[in-house]
Amino acid sequence: MYNRQYRHFVYGKPLKTRVIRIRSWIQAITLVVLTVFACLLVYRIIYSASAKGRIPSEWDNYDALHALLPTAALESLFVSVKTTGSQHDRRLPVLLQTWFQLVCAHTWFFTDTDDPQYAERTRGHLIKTNCPASHEIGDLCCDLWVAVEKFVESGQVWFCHVHDDVYVNVPRLLDLLSEHDPREAWYLGKPSVRVPRTNSSEAPEQVHFSFASSDSGFCLSRALALEMMPVAGRGKFASICKTMGMSYDVTLGYVIEHLLNTSLTVIDKFHSHREAMKLIEIETLYEHITFSYSNDKINVVNLDGFDVEMDPTRFLTIHCYLFPNFSFCPK
């Protein structure tokens, strides 16, 4: 009798009751686990969707991505970005958040204004040119030549110049430079038009030459920059600009093609806001070197991504298309 009762009791409680309670605990734990999993899943979906509303941080760690860049070309690069004080807040933040992070040690911003905020945000890579803050031809030419001289002083072997409304596809740029020997004279860029010059009565005879548009960016080898110094250094470049009455990129083409007899090597993967950005095929985006935009008359790369109000230039969207592992990109 005692043994039969014992089989139905565990520590004084009926065995059936004990089994029921164990099952209840298992069900409760299972429900909690499923609830937590569901919450995490919902959070991930919401978090990814809300990426369109997040501002990227400027100094994420991208060591793994840097390791994939061609080291030799990267270490030899000097990127000059032309900007002006009135455009710092409007144009520089998106550059600092995107492609600048890949080449921050090799990129310098040349401006007409002291700006402690952006000096810090660029890690000391904001240079005041001390050229007059105007759009006079000679003053703009002064800005470029300050950048060229800084490049020569740096010892780097490639000088690439862009405006502050240009996105640079860094890996593709490095690929391009890797295909050329900087010990030879190279002038790489995209021509605007072929021009007879000049309109000034004080200018030399009319000559024909091509020039790489500064709106889309261009690159010079160190060998070419050194050849330019005797004919354009020590203030001569600004004087030639004034004599010709033309912008600095046109004058640069004159110096290189006419005075130095070095032809422009046309790279059609450079793009400016003067082109229809929407014509760039998304499937070929990786192949292009520079992109630009114009918000006055909407002219941007036609790519879905971040909300237009947050990303009017489409640079954030382009960057996430090219580098989807950046922390601010939707997953």
Image: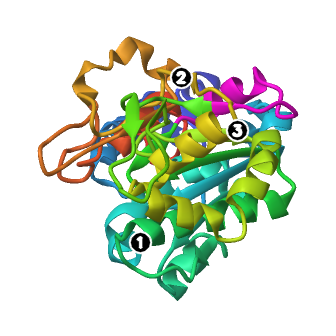
Q: Quadrant of the C terminus?
A: top left
Marks 3/2 in contact by CB < 8 Å: the verdict is: no
- Establish if 236 lies above or below 193: below
Q: Which mark is residue 267?
A: 2
Q: What residue type is disc 3 on? A: Leu
* Mark sitting earlier along the chain (2/1): 1
Q: Which of the two residues, 328 or 303, is positioned nearer the viewer here?
A: 303
Disc 3, SS: loop
Check disc 2 and give the amino acid type: Ile
Mark 3 neighbour class, 10 Å CA radius: few under 14, some 14 to 19, many 20 or more: some
Mark pair 2, 1: CA separation: 27 Å
Number of marks in the rendered image? 3
Labels 1 and 3: the sequence-earlier one: 1
Q: Is residue 56 visible?
A: no
* Residue at 46% across, 69% down: 138
Q: Find residue 246 and report its horizontal and vertical position in percent.
A: 39, 54
Residue 150 position (above or below residue 48):
below
Image x and y of residue 281, in percent: 33, 15
Closer to the N terminus: mark 3 or mark 2? 3
* Vertical relation: 165 (above or below) 261: below
Residue 176: within the magenta? yes
Q: Residue at x 54, y 87 (%)?
A: 116
Residue at x-position 72% and y-position 29%: 177
Residue 260's tag is 3
* Label 1 element class: loop
Q: Marks 1 and 3, how far apart in space? A: 30 Å
Question: In the rendered image, which residue does mark 1 sit on?
Answer: 84
Q: Would residue 146 appear left or right of 71 to someone viewing this image?
A: left
- In the image, the segment drawn in magenta is 169-187
Q: How many angstroms separate mark 3 from mark 2 (CA)?
A: 20 Å
